[in-house]
Amino acid sequence: EAALTTERPSLTKLWIYTNYDCNLSCTYCVAESGPRTPRRVLDLETVQRVVDEAVALDFSHLYLTGGEPFLLDDIYDMLAYASARAQTTVLTNGMLFNARRLDRLATIADNNLVVQVSLDGARPEHHDAYRGAGTWAKTVEGIHRLQQRGLRVRLSTTETPANAGHLEELHAFRRFLGIAEDDHVIRPLARRGFAQEGLEMGVECLLPEVTVSAGGVFWHPLASPSSTDMQVTRQIFPLAVAVESIHRQLDQILDSGAAGPEEFT
């Protein structure tokens, strides 16, 4: 459930959009990613500087996402650098893990690294409805391959009209996969990016989770590339400037007497 707050929360999560191109064309993608989407990549040096400044600002958990991060040759160096300094989660659709990618990922894996795979159902029809025909089987195979290499896998589920009545079945399937309940995140569908249905989400109702992309710094990872309502600054560095701006804006929201922003979990 969403946690309401009337006091300024600590900023602990920092998201990095490494790229925007993807091997899938999910119809609910908030990042507006797809095979024909421009890459708009953050290079290794930029990601390393973001990590250093985030750690100096006491961010405790880093999330690297896309697009599909494993389309990037530099993703392994990015993950190695980040996980050596903070808890690090990389988000993926799990479909690209051939032997070469698994070897490279296993080589840099440590106790700080989590691979979060998007899985929307225990059956293909619950997952493929928004992510494309045949994707469920490839995703599940990717999960098995990651587990066989000893990598910690977390699941991320978007609740949609296709799977909303079948979440207990998904929980049973998660247990079958050997994944703990604490390693399963379920979020409602947000009407952002490509999504034509779901909850309306904006700055005024979301707790900030600082997000960095090629377009600058944003309030939350739900920020869509085609909109600017969540943009904080166009310049990434120094990151402290954007963080202070977020603090000021959050204080204004809390001082306004509104119900308070919520954590989107």
Image (cartoon, rainbow, N blue to C red):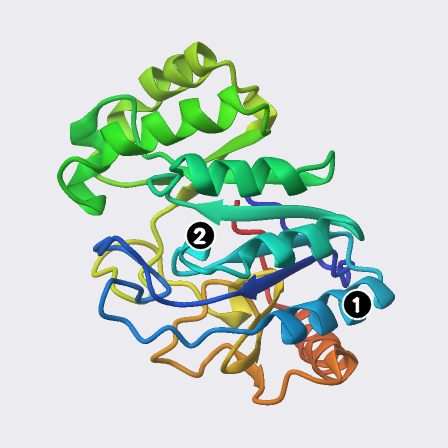
| Quarter of the rendering occupied by the N terminus | top right
Q: Is 160 rendered above or below residue 73?
A: above
What percent of the width, then of the height, locates residue 106?
59, 35
User: Between tags 1 and 2, which lies in front?
Assistant: 2
Q: Which residue lies under the disc numbered 1? A: 52
Residue 163 visible in the current orientation: no
Give the Cα distance between marks 1 and 2: 22 Å
What percent of the width, then of the height, locates residue 199?
35, 56
Tell me which residue sits at (71%, 85%) in the image. Answer: 237
In the image, 133: left or right of 260?
left
Q: Residue furthest bottom?
A: 234
What percent of the width, then of the height, locates residue 112?
73, 40
Q: Nearer the viewer, residue 107 or 46?
A: 107
Q: Earlier in the sequence, mark 1 or mark 2?
A: 1
Mark 1 burial class by Cα count in 10 Å: few <14, some 14-19, many 20+:
some
In the image, 195: left or right of 159?
left
Residue 71 visible in the current orientation: yes
Q: Which residue lies under the disc numbered 2? A: 70
Q: Nearer the viewer, residue 101 or 198?
A: 101
Q: Amino acid at mark 1?
A: Asp
In the image, 87: left or right of 58?
left
Tell me which residue sits at (64%, 52%) in the image. Answer: 79
